Amino acid sequence: MTKNKFVQALNFLSFNLGSVKPITGPFKLQMELTHRCNSRCPTCGFWQEKKHDEDMSTEECLQIIREAAKINVFRISFTGGEPLLRKDLFQLVRFAKQQGLKVNINTNALLLWHYHEKIIASGVDSLAISLDAPIAKIHDKNRGLEGAFEKTIKGIKKIIAYEERPKILICMTLNKNNCRYILAMVNFCKKLGIDYLAFEPAHSINEYWNCPDEMKMSSNDISEMEKQMELAIEEGNQIVVPPFSYYRQFGKFLKQPEYLRKFRATAGYFFATITANGDLYSSPVIEKKIGNLKKDSLINLFFSKKFMNERKRIKSGKHLIHWFNSTGPFDMSMYHLRRIHLKEIFNIVKSKRY
Ligand SMILES: C[S@@+](CC[C@H](N)C(=O)[O-])C[C@H]1O[C@@H](n2cnc3c(N)ncnc32)[C@H](O)[C@@H]1O
Ligand code: SF4
C-alpha cells in the first residue's frame, strides 16, 4: 500500500468516527482548469460565462499540484469547462504523475481524436468522458452541438486501440431526453470496450448547474429511470461503478432531496474543488468560498479555520443538497463502511475504481 493510500485509509476511519478535522488532504481534488468550452450543453453554465480571462497560470497550477502531493491527495481530476482547451494540460498531467498522484481528465472528448497521442504519452490514469446517449441525435441534443456524438466516439475508439492506455469511464448525465436509454447505454458501452460507466442526475441548483424546465424529468420519467437503473445495475455490474446504492437515490434526489441529508456529506473532507480562477470550495456546487489559491496556499486554506467551519456546517446538514458523481458515491461508501454493509463494500473493492 502506498503512503498516501495508507494515510487516506486512516482519514476514512477518522471521518467515520465523527471527526470534522481531516488528518490529511482530500482523497480527490478537482481542478477546473478553465471555464471555456467547445460544447454548448443546455444544462451547463460554464460555456455561458462572459469573462474567461482569470484562469490560473501554469505556474499557479503546478504549485497547487506540488502542495496536493505534500498533503497526500490521492487523485487529481482536471476538469472545466473543457480541460483539453488548455495548452498546458499535458504538462500538468505529467507533473502530477511525477508527484505520485493518480490523474484523471474529465472531458467532452470532442478533441480526443486530435490529442490521442499526447494523451497516451502523458501517462494519465483515466479519462472520464461525457456521453449522454448511445444514439447520436440524443447526445447531440444534450450537448447543444450537431456532430458531437460522432467526434466523441471517434476519439474514444482512437484511445481504445492502444494496448496501454488510460481507463475509460463514461459519464452519462441523466435528464428527460436520455433517462429511458440507461440500459441501452450499458450494452453500447460494453460493446465499445469501455472500462467503467457512471451516471449522474442533471442538477438545477445554480447558474452553473441548471437543467432547463423542458429537460427535467416528470414523475413518470423518474419511475422509468428507476426501473432502467435496476436493470442496468444487473446487466452492467462489471462496468457500472459502485456503490450501486448511489444510483438508487436518484429518484429521491429529484423528488425529495431533503431525504439525502440522512447521508453525511463527504465534500470538504475527502473532496475539494478549485475553480478556474483559483477559488477553493468544498464541492462543485461552489457554495461557500474558502479562499483563493492565487493569493494563498492550498495547505493553508485546506487546514484553515474557515474550512473547518465549513466542514462543521456540512456535517450539521446545512449545505445545499447535491448528488454529483464526484461526491455522492463517497457519501454512500462512507455510509456503508460505517454500517459494515459487506455487499456494497465488496462491490467497491472488486471494481478497483478507487
Ligand atoms: C461541467 S462538465 C466538465 C468536463 C467536460 N466539459 C465534460 O463535459 O465532460 C462535467 C460533467 O458535468 C455534467 N453536467 C452538465 N450539466 C450538469 C448539470 N446541470 N447537473 C449535473 N451535471 C451536469 C456534464 O455532463 C459532465 O459529465
Ligand atoms: S458540460 Fe462540459 S462539455 Fe458541456 S458545456 Fe459544460 S463544460 Fe462544456
Image (cartoon, rainbow, N blue to C red):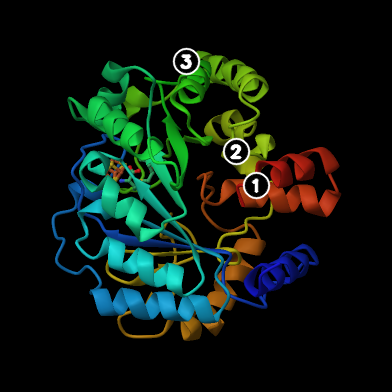
Query: Mark on residue 241?
Result: 2
Query: Mark on residue 352?
Result: 1
Q: Secondary structure at mark 3?
A: loop
Does label 2 or label 1 sit earlier along the sequence?
2
Q: Is residue 126 left or right of residue 314?
A: left
Badge 3 amino acid: Arg
Q: Is residue 81 visible?
A: no
Which residue is more in the foreground, 81 or 69?
Answer: 69
Picture quadrant where residue 235 is located:
top right
Residue for point 28% across, 46% down = 116
What whole-number distance in Å separates the C-alpha atoms at marks 1 and 3?
Answer: 28 Å
Instruction: Estimate the x, y position of residue 350 in percent, counting from the top left.
Output: 72, 42
Badge 1 amino acid: Lys
Q: How packed is label 1: few (under 14 Cα within 10 Å), some, or many (20 or more)?
A: few
In the displayed structure, would residue 38 be above or below residue 145? below
Picture quadrant where residue 161 is located:
top left
- Count of labels in the image: 3
Residue pointed to by mark 3: 180
Q: Quadrant of the N terminus?
A: bottom right
